[in-house]
């Protein structure tokens, strides 16, 4: 299993300034994460894995107050359609469990699309590799590490 320890080493090797927050309780939902840190839902990011019509993984990153539009995501990635990845697919492609997926440091290279709104923030907080760990990171670092495209991908 890939963990927050692996993620921490990955970030260090790539010279990324980031902070981890570890909690006793889970932080798997936007509300749980926002409540634990006392910040707004829009400062939380969701890294949601989809699979396109050819079986390839596609990661959509949006703020916690928004939802990924499957139609828009399919359009920007050049697919006929995308569907949410099943739990086993999330684990296979990212190395992490659903609810713990960080925006970077995945098991395999995943095409990544960041919603425009995410880029407005200096720092955002997302999954930290474990269901009770959060990662604070700059959206510009996410973009650089994943070679992500920035696009409107929300409903």
Image: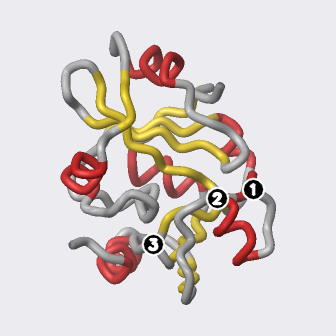
Q: Earlier in the sequence, mark 3 or mark 1?
A: 1
Left or right of 60? Residue 95 is: left
Kindly identify the residue that appears in the image at 45 percent across and 60 percent down. 99
Q: Residue 33: x percent and y percent?
A: 65, 68
Image x and y of residue 8, in percent: 39, 79
In-image side of 34 versus 127 (left or right): right
Name the element at disc 3. Answer: loop
Question: Could you tell me how far apart the alpha carbons at marks 3 and 2 are, in whole angstroms?
Answer: 12 Å
Examine the rendering and report whether any part of residue 51 can be seen: yes
Q: Are marks 3 and 1 in contact (CB under 8 Å)?
A: no
Residue at image position (41%, 59%) is 101
Residue 23 placement (x, y as % from top left): 57, 86
**Left or right for 116, reference 7:** right
The quarter of the displayed image where residue 102 is located? bottom left
Give residue 57's mark.
Answer: none
Q: Secondary structure at mark 2?
A: helix
Q: Residues within 10 Å of mark 2 (few under 14, many from 20)?
A: many
Percent x, y of residue 144 = 45, 50
Q: Is residue 109 above or below residue 97?
A: above
| Structure colour scheme | secondary structure
Pointer 1: what residue? 41
Alpha-carbon span between mark 3 and mark 1: 17 Å
Which mark is drawn over residue 131?
3
Q: Kindly indicate whether the residue at mark 1 contacts the one at mark 2 (C-beta within 8 angstroms).
A: yes
Neighbor class of circle 1 (other Cα within 10 Å; few <14, some 14-19, many 20+) is some
Sequence-wise, the earlier of marks 3 and 2 is 2
Badge 1 marks a residue whose secondary structure is helix
Disc marking residue 30: 2
């Amino acid at each position: 299993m890939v963990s927050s320890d692996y993620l921490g080493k990955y970030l260090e090797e790539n010279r990324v300034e980031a902070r981890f927050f570890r909690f006793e309780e889970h932080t798997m939902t936007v509300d749980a994460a926002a409540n634990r840190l006392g910040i707004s839902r829009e400062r939380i990011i969701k890294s949601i894995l989809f699979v396109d019509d050819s079986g390839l993984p596609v990661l959509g990153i949006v703020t916690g107050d928004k939802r990924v539009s499957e139609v828009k995501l399919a359009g920007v990635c050049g697919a006929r359609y995308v569907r949410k990845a099943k739990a086993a697919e999330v684990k296979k492609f990212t190395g992490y469990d659903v609810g713990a997926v960080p925006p970077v440091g995945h098991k395999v290279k995943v095409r990544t699309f960041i919603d425009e709104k995410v880029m407005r923030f200096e720092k955002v907080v997302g999954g930290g590799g474990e269901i009770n760990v959060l990662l604070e990171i700059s959206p510009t670092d996410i973009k650089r590490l994943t070679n992500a495209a920035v696009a409107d991908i929300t409903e």
